[in-house]
Image (cartoon, rainbow, N blue to C red):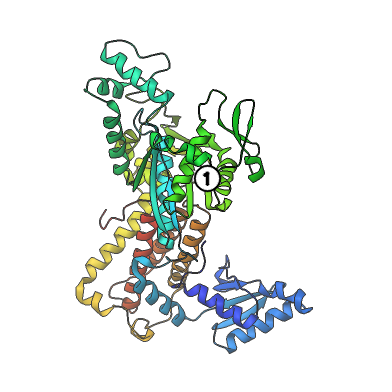
Amino acid sequence: MEGLVANDPVARLADAITQLAGSPVALERPGDPEHGDYATNVALKLAGLQKRAPREVAEEIAARAVELGVAHRAEAAGPGFVNLWVPDAWLADAVTEIVAAGFDFGGGSAVEAERVQVEMVSANPTGPITVAHARNGAYGDSVARLLEFAGHAVEREYYYNDAGAQMERFYASVDALRHGEEPPQDGYRGEYMNDLAGLPGDPVPTMLASMEASLERFRVHFDSRTRETEVEAEIPEAVALLETYEEDGALWARTSAHGDDKDRVLVRSDGAPTYYAKDAAYIRRKFASGHERLVYVLGADHHGYVGRLQALAEMLGHPRESVEVLIYQLVHLVEGGAAKKMSKRRGDVVFLDELLDTIGVDAARWYLVSRGHDQTIELDVDLAKERSNKNPVYYVQYAHARIAGILRNAGENVIQRSAVSDTVPDTLSAALTDEERELVKRLLEFPGVAAQATGRRAPHAIPVYAIRVADDFHRFYHGHRVLESEQEAFRLQLVRGVQNVIARCLDLVGVEAPERM
């Protein structure tokens, strides 16, 4: 789904090397700048095809790269790597392009834009949003933001159960409390239940409004909502489209013929539809709405859903890969060095609002996407509350705020003088320092980082990258003046580019980019 980005100077450089090498080239940044700004192993791949020594091929590519002006300097290294050095002017042009692109720099990686629905959270209206639900929302919303940044049209969907056994227990619990009785043994308890029991009428709309308010506070909003009872009414139409057979009085879907590990029951022998029949009706409804790709964000107990949902898609005439099931792991809160389990309102979970009251929305959003969704998160509440460089979200936000301060101090006249110019000499008046070169190259990684994070559904790569940008910026800032320096014009452009990239990174994971801290 994701490819090259139009405003990506490194991709264009790789394309230029590809043209002279005659084979696709991927560029990497060497760990040691002494080994070049960029490097490629294309000569190792070509050597076998050309029946030549890899080192000989590397030397030829290096010589041609310099001869054609693709690189300022190039050399063969090791068994057949090509190390490339780009001139200061190339880096200055790249900064100009970053600033000109603004908040859009690095976006638009979609090879072919799709209509994508991301279904996330989908907690039943039986209690407030928990921290586990919050990880679902933070992860799902960040995936949606990445997809939008890549150029896809994204709808965020919430699906909730408004019927069935869980809702029956919920209603029975509220009714018991209203009559001064204890809820059923398997019912719902807690302060929030007492609050609901004290209100007249159906408790579900009140519960839903409370859940939605928590999610909106968490910067997770939804474009569409679907009730289970709506889907139930469409089961017969959906089942009629599937490949089925009868056995032992039940109706089965032949899902094993479509990649599932076994066939699934659709209608039990007593005539009652299974939850899988609802899945069939729901997935049919999703595709009927015009969506070309369906993304489900589900908890760790849903691993078996991948094959069965993809089988439904195939039986309904859609590619298996058009359905993605993203499984996220648990969240453990640690406070004072010990696991945090207690809640003011219920003894076995922590609600999202409690977490937000304690660490704030920015820290919660950051920490709940800071690790891969297939890994358990241990969220250190004490660290997340800390307003110091030990706290990574504060550290990155502080870099953004520091740049905002530089630009305020520069004043309008200086900003106008440093506006994006057509010629490099207007912005570059001396050789770039090592810190400047490294910072520019770090910014140029962003299009690739964003595209890869999108393709892998891995938003945790964004905070990791943002910390590296902040590291390089702080290193540059502590070593060099921006204002009233020989390089003032270029450095103002550079820090504005850093500010834009940091702001976009923070936005992609639902974190604000403050102007002052």
420 versus 68 height, above or below: above
Image position, residue 170 (x, y; %): 36, 22
Image position, residue 19 (x, y; %): 60, 81
Q: Viewed as shown, does residue 442 lie left or right of 125?
A: right
The answer, for residue 376, to whether it is visible in the render is no
In the image shown, does 497 or 322 lie closer to the viewer?
322
378 versus 6 height, above or below: above
Q: Viewed as shown, does residue 3 lie left or right of 222?
A: right
Image position, residue 24 (x, y; %): 62, 74
Q: Amino acid at mark 1?
A: Val
Local crowd size for mark 1, using a 10 Å CA cut-off: few (<14), some (14–19), many (≥20): many
Q: SS of the residue at dot 1?
A: strand
Q: Residue furthest right?
A: 51
Q: Viewed as shown, does residue 22 lie left or right of 489?
A: right
Q: Quadrant of residue 353?
A: top left
Instruction: Please name the residue that numbered disc 1 is placed on.
Output: 325
